[in-house]
Image (cartoon, grey):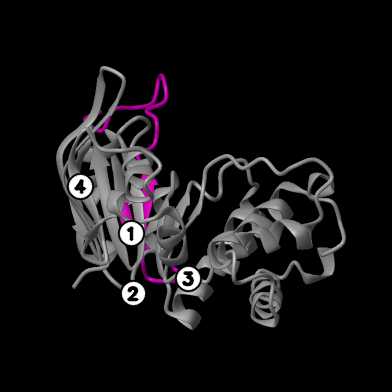
C-alpha cells in the first residue's frame, strides 16, 4: 500500500481553481521533486498532501485513510512539513525551536522524556546545528535558519517529510548544502521526501522520482534520466534548450538555448 497519494483532487483558492481531477502518488522510499512554472499548482498540491488546505473535491490518503479523518497529532507523527515561509517566535533559541518538533509525541500522560532528548540531539546532529544550540534563531544566516527548521521537522521522526521550496532565498552554496542534507536523509535514513523546487537542474540531480506540472496537471513523472529531454522542458516551461549529461552526476542538465544576437550572421549566409 502506498503511504501518501491524492485521488481526483480539485484544489481551489476562493473561486479560483488551481487544479482539477488531479491524481498524484508519492512512491514509498523516494526523494520526489515537483517542478513546474510559477503558479502551476505545485505548492498547492504539496499543501493539500500535507493537509494544510482541504480539496474541494477528491481526497488525500495517508496510510490508506482519508487524511482529513485522522487526528492532527496522528498526522504529525506520520508526516512532517517544512513550509515555504517559517517565522520563529522572538528570542527563541535553536535548541528550543528544534524541541518543538516533539510536540506530536507529547500528551497528558506523556511529557518530556529521554527519548525526546535523543530525538532532538539526533536531529541537530544530522543537520549540523548542534554548535548553534544556544544561539537565537533570528541571529542566524538564511542557510543556518533553514537547517534549524529542517532539524525541527526531523525531530518529529516522521517517515514522510514534505518540503515547500526549501532553497528559496538561499545562495547557491547554501542551496546545495540543504539539498545534500536532504539526499543524505533519504539515503541514510530511508525517509520518503517530497520537495517543491524551482531549479530544474537541482531537481534532476537530486530526485529519484520527478513530477513535472503545468497548469494544474501532471505532464510527466518518473526517473529524471528517463523523462527529462528538450521536448519536455519546452512543453512544461516554454524554454528552448539542450539536455546534456551533467559531468558530475550523469543526470540531465538543461542548457538554455542562446539568445540570438542582433546583427549576428545567419546560418544561411
Report how far apart the C-alphas of labels 2 and 3 lie in the structure. 24 Å
Report how far apart the C-alphas of labels 1 and 3 lie in the structure. 12 Å
Q: Secondary structure at mark 4?
A: strand
Picture coordinates of residue 139, whole percent (x, y): 84, 47
Task: Mark 2 vs mark 3: give the one in front.
Answer: 2
Task: Mark 1 vs mark 4: give the one in front.
Answer: 4
Magenta residues, start to end: 243-269
Q: Earlier in the sequence, mark 1 or mark 4?
A: 4
Q: Give the crowd class for mark 2: few <14, some 14-19, many >=20 residues within 10 Å.
A: some
Q: Earlier in the sequence, mark 2 or mark 1?
A: 2
Judging depth in this view, the residue of 5 and 102 nearest the camera is: 102
Q: Where is 94 relative to 116, above or below?
A: above
Picture coordinates of residue 224, whole percent (x, y): 28, 62
Q: Secondary structure at mark 3?
A: loop
Task: Mark 2 vs mark 1: give the one in front.
Answer: 2
**Residue to which mark 4 is pinned:** 59
Residue 77 lies left or right of residue 138; in this view the side is left
Q: Give the overall secondary structure of the magenta segment.
A: loop
Picture coordinates of residue 107, whole percent (x, y): 57, 64
**Residue to which mark 3 is pinned:** 248
Whether residue 177 is visible to the viewer of this picture, yes or no, is no
Picture coordinates of residue 209, whole percent (x, y): 29, 64
* Residue 125 painted magenta: no
The quadrant of the rendering that contains the N terminus is bottom left
Amino acid at each position: 500500500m502506498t503511504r501518501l497519494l491524492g485521488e481526483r483532487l480539485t484544489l481551489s483558492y476562493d473561486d479560483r481553481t488551481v487544479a482539477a481531477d488531479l491524481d498524484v502518488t508519492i512512491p514509498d522510499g523516494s526523494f520526489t521533486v515537483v517542478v513546474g512554472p510559477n503558479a502551476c499548482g505545485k505548492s498547492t498540491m504539496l499543501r493539500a498532501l500535507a493537509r494544510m488546505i482541504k480539496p474541494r473535491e477528491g481526497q488525500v490518503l495517508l496510510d490508506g485513510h482519508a487524511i482529513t479523518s485522522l487526528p492532527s497529532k496522528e498526522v504529525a507523527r506520520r508526516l512532517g512539513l517544512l513550509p515555504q515561509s517559517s517565522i520563529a517566535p522572538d528570542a527563541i533559541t535553536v535548541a528550543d525551536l528544534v524541541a518543538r518538533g516533539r510536540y506530536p509525541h507529547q500528551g497528558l500522560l506523556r511529557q518530556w522524556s529521554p527519548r525526546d532528548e535523543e530525538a532532538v540531539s539526533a536531529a541537530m546532529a544530522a543537520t549540523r546545528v548542534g554548535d548553534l544550540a544556544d544561539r537565537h534563531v533570528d541571529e542566524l544566516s538564511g542557510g543556518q535558519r533553514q537547517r534549524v527548521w529542517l532539524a525541527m521537522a526531523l525531530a518529529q521522526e516522521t517517515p514522510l517529510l514534505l518540503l515547500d521550496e526549501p532553497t528559496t532565498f538561499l545562495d547557491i552554496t547554501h542551496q546545495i548544502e540543504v539539498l545534500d542534507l536532504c539526499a543524505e536523509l533519504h539515503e541514510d535514513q530511508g525517509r520518503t521526501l517530497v520537495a517543491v523546487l524551482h531549479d530544474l537542474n537541482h531537481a534532476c540531480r537530486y530526485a529519484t522520482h520527478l513530477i513535472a506540472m503545468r497548469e494544474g496537471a501532471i505532464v510527466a513523472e518518473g526517473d529524471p534520466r528517463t523523462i527529462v529531454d528538450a521536448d519536455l522542458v519546452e512543453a512544461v516551461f516554454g524554454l528552448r534548450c539542450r539536455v546534456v549529461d551533467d559531468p558530475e552526476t550523469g543526470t540531465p542538465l538543461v542548457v538554455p538555448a542562446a539568445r540570438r544576437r542582433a546583427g549576428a550572421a545567419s546560418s544561411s549566409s
